[in-house]
């Protein structure tokens, strides 16, 4: 049996089963070996009925004390029975297994294994597996039985049998890792690891096997990425640029001086743009750290070199905001700018397409509309995506195909620990803005209960009297009977009543028409509206430096990273700013979580704490669903393995890497295929 053989060389896999396997991406012996269990079932000694509590999955040894009775409820054939051991009795239920009626004998002892629930106030074991033969069960004791991801037509048992056969007939699994690395990191042998991951001797052995296989995934991924990156490094740009004096001039004329972190990021960008290679850079900086100006400088540089450049942002509100600030900063330098968003009329769009195609504009700002088929660019040399996590990388790539191979600059305010950033944005170089403008005062935070509202409103009133503005965030747009949380529409009404009439309160939410949203945002930015009640649509990138209060209702409903983003909407100017997190529950856990924000304004710290508390899914708000998935490894929870695997990959010379992939010609493709579908 060979690694690349089709799975139908295995006994019991015919045409139909083969097709079913294909549906979950399994074609070869290797695929099946790498179809890892999603968990294990641990068989324990039988327990006494009196020891069982709700929710347990247990085995009992008991005899049937009442003949099974059968009834039909809609399409379901339900079989009820009662069993007893020396400590008590238990109800047992099976669904759609009528043939058990004749198989189970009154008074006989069997082993039943299943989950115990409470139904009508009584404990019931549902759909238990029956072991008619005691020895059959005792053989399973202490063994971790693999539980596989399945699809229709494929049972767990079928996979177990097939994998066992592979283990019996395949001598060696391919080992990708050089011996010196395996030794240095005390890795389990790969062949053994592939056995133990499916049929572990015990838990410790399974963990060690898993570590080895996760290491392989990360190690190879890091290597492949390195090769990809170095090959990219050699890809010559079609859009070489020269340094332009206008950029220095713009910096000189700003009402503030750039921080040293901004300056050093700008140096990175300049170096990239003036080199003969394509730029692929991520600028990572906490909320309000001043990333936008770097985008502006890069756009100016591209335009002054005679190229087109575009800035793609996730929302219409943000596109409008950037458009306005770009016009303010760049028109003096003879740069023409146009806006392109989904809500523009057909005619407006057509006009924009014409301007772009004929290079009547140098810079295009917009939303997804920028990557519509109809947009034809003329010499698109630079693509900047803001908050790229809101775009799939697919979309980014689509935009890239509109130019030859434009330079790419990605802006992200998502605080990700460096090791993770290296993997998540593995093909990008990274500049970090780790410093806030000097004159910023740290935001003052408080976590309060709903009874604090009257005091909060008085506080907002005072701030407004001083010429400042406030945001109030609610989780919902409108009332929903099923969810107890504040909603924007009703809240605005209440707030209008609670605040003096001269204070203008308006609302903003995602369901409003683009034009209405823009209008409200514009009026807020101009100071015509003093208090804006909104959903999280303001979360990303909105910049109104005069706003100094952020009040978040039902703060417990948001992730910490998201709350940090919301908080980032204030403290963007020279005024002291405040954040009031209103906790709508008494839960201690919720309050503890919010205390993390109370204590720190540092996005990286918050991200780490959130990771500890809630796990990765909720934290990053990015790349959550199926993003950068490895078969076994999880880049967040296996961060420790990721770190050493990346370190090990760095120890490999280019020649050694070449050898690894040469020996396994399908491997690199496979990894990079995964990359392109995820990164
Ligand atoms: N060096 C600086 N000194 C003072 N103010 C600055 C400096 N750099 C930028 N700013 C101002 O700080 C505010 C926030 O900057 P910007 O909008 O670029 O933040 P950002 O990094 O994009 O944040 P976010 O991720 O929250 O959108 C803007 O009003 C900007 O004009």
Image (cartoon, rainbow, N blue to C red):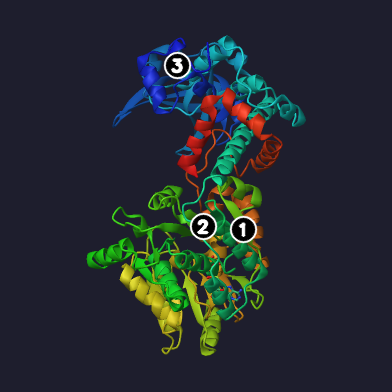
Left or right position of 499 against 609? left
Asked where in the image residue 345 lies, by quadrant, the reply is bottom left
Q: Nearer the viewer, residue 516 or 85?
A: 516
Q: Secondary structure beneath disc 2?
A: strand
Residue 431 disc label: 1
Of the numbered discs in the image, which one, if any, rests on residue 548? Answer: none
**Residue 490 higher or lower than 133, as above or below:** below
Tell which circle, 2 or 3, labels the residue nearer the N-terminal end.
Answer: 3
Residue at label 2?
Answer: 409
Q: Would you name the residue on which mark 3 appears?
A: 6
- The CA distance from mark 1 to mark 3 is 46 Å
**Residue 88 at what x, y percent from top left?**
57, 26
* Image depth: mark 2 or mark 3 in front: 2
Identify the residue at image location x=45%, y=88%: 500
Ligand 1 under 8 Å from disc 2 Cβ: no
Q: Secondary structure at mark 1?
A: strand
Other-residue count near label 3 (Cα within 10 Å), few / some / many at <14 / 14–19 / ≥20: some
């Amino acid at each position: 049996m060979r690694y690349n053989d089709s799975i139908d060389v295995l006994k019991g896999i015919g045409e139909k089963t083969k097709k079913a396997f294909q549906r979950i991406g399994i074609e070869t012996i290797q695929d099946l070996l790498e179809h890892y269990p999603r968990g294990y079932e641990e068989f324990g000694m039988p327990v006494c009925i009196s020891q069982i509590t709700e929710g347990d999955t247990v085995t009992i040894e008991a005899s049937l004390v009442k003949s099974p009775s059968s009834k039909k409820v809609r399409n379901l054939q339900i079989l009820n029975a009662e069993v007893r051991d020396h400590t008590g009795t238990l109800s047992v239920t099976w669904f759609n297994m009528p043939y058990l009626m004749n198989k189970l004998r009154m008074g006989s002892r069997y082993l039943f294994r299943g989950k115990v629930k409470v139904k009508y106030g009584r404990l019931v074991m549902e759909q238990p597996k029956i072991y008619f033969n005691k020895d059959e069960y005792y053989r399973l004791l202490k063994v971790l039985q693999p539980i596989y991801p399945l699809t229709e037509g494929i049972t767990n048992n079928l996979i177990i049998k097939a994998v066992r056969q592979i283990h019996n007939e395949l001598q060696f699994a391919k080992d990708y890792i050089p011996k010196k690395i395996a030794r240095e990191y005390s890795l389990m042998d790969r062949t053994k690891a592939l056995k133990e991951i499916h049929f572990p001797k015990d838990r410790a052995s399974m963990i060690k096997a898993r570590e080895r296989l996760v290491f392989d995934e990360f190690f190879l991924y890091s290597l492949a990425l390195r090769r990809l990156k170095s090959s990219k490094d050699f890809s010559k740009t079609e859009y070489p640029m020269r340094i332009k004096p206008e950029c220095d001039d713009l910096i000189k004329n700003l009402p503030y001086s750039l921080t040293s972190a901004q300056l050093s990021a700008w140096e990175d960008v300049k170096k990239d743009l003036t080199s003969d290679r394509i730029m692929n850079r991520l600028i990572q900086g906490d909320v309000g750290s001043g990333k936008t100006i770097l985008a502006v400088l890069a756009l100016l540089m591209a335009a002054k070199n005679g190229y087109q450049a575009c800035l793609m942002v996730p929302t219409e509100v943000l596109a409008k905001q950037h458009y306005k600030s770009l016009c303010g900063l760049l028109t003096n330098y003879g740069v023409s700018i146009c806006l392109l968003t989904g809500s523009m009329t057909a005619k407006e769009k057509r006009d924009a397409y014409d301007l772009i195609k004929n290079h009547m504009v140098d810079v295009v700002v917009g939303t997804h509309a920028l990557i519509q088929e109809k947009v034809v660019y003329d010499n698109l040399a630079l693509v900047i995506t803001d908050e790229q996590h809101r775009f799939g990388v697919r979309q980014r790539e689509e935009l890239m195909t509109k130019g030859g191979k434009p330079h790419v600059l990605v802006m992200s305010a998502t605080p990700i620990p460096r090791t993770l950033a290296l993997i998540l944005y593995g093909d990008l170089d990274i500049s970090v803005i780790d410093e806030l403008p000097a004159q910023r005062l740290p935001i003052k935070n408080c976590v309060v209960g709903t009874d604090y509202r009257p005091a909060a409103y008085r506080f907002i009133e005072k701030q407004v009297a001083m010429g400042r503005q406030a945001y109030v965030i609610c989780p919902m747009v409108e009332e929903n009977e099923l969810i107890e949380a504040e909603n924007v529409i009703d809240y605005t009404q209440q707030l209008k009543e609670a605040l003096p009439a001269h204070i203008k309160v308006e609302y903003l939410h995602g369901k409003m028409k683009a034009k209405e949203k823009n209008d409200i945002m514009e009026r807020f930015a101009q100071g015509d509206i003093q208090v804006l009640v909104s959903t999280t649509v303001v979360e990303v990138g909105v910049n109104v430096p005069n706003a100094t209060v952020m009040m978040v209702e039902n703060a417990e409903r948001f992730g910490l990273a998201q709350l940090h983003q919301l908080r980032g909407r204030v403290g963007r100017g020279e005024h002291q700013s405040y954040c009031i997190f209103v906790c709508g529950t008494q839960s201690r856990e919720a309050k503890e979580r919010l205390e993390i924000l109370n204590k720190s304004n540092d996005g990286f710290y918050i991200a780490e704490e959130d990771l500890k508390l809630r796990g990765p899914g909720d934290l990053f708000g990015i790349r959550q669903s199926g993003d950068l998935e490895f078969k076994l490894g999880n880049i967040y929870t296996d961060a420790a393995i990721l770190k050493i695997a990346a370190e090990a990959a760095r120890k490999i010379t280019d020649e050694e890497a070449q050898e690894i992939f040469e020996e396994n010609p399908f491997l690199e493709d496979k990894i990079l295929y995964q990359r392109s579908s995820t990164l």
